[in-house]
Amino acid sequence: APESPDNTPVKVELHLKPIQSMLHHQKPLVFLLNSPQPLIWNVKAENLELHIRHTFHVSRGSEVHFQQRNSSLFTQVQENLPHGNGRLLKYAQE
């Protein structure tokens, strides 16, 4: 996506909710939000258990904003996320 006219990072909406067969997602989730340019990720999470830590890894210069206050959602900004799907998968597994 191109940068916005005032050179601020572009905003991306990310809506997370469990599949229909689950009332609440009860396992820890790890999200790798990677982009070649800085983005602002606006995350709306529904029905994620509050006592389980969910982690968002984002590329340098990017930010994660949560619509609801939830202490189990955690952001970790990485200086350099690996490039390529295989390397990102290996990073996530580690």
Image: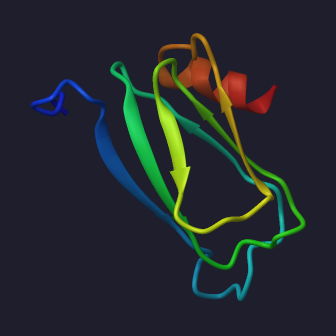
Image-based side of 34 in relation to 45, left or right: left
User: Residue 9 sits in which quadrant?
Assistant: top left
- On the rendered image, what quadrant is the N terminus found in? top left
Viewer-proximal residue among 40 and 33 = 40
Q: Residue at x 77, y 31 (%)?
A: 93
* Closer-to-camera residue (64/16): 64
Q: Residue at x 70, y 23 (%)?
A: 90
Q: Residue 30 appears at what percent x and percent y?
A: 71, 45
**Residue at coordinates 84% horizontally, 54% vertically from top-left?**
53
Left or right: where does residue 74 sit relative to residue 26?
A: left
The percent coordinates of residue 46 (x first, y second) are: 60, 76
Residue at the left extreme of this rendering: 5
Residue 86 image offset from top left, x and y in percent:
57, 22
Indicate whether 85 appears above or below 46.
Answer: above
Q: Residue furthest right?
A: 51
Residue pictured at 50% horizontal, 35% vertical: 63
Colouring used for the render: rainbow
Q: How many marks?
A: 0
25 or 63, nearer to the observer: 63
Residue 41: give x, y in percent of width and height: 44, 45
Give the vertical position of 60 relative to 18 (above or below). Answer: above
Please identify the quadrant where the C terminus is shown.
top right
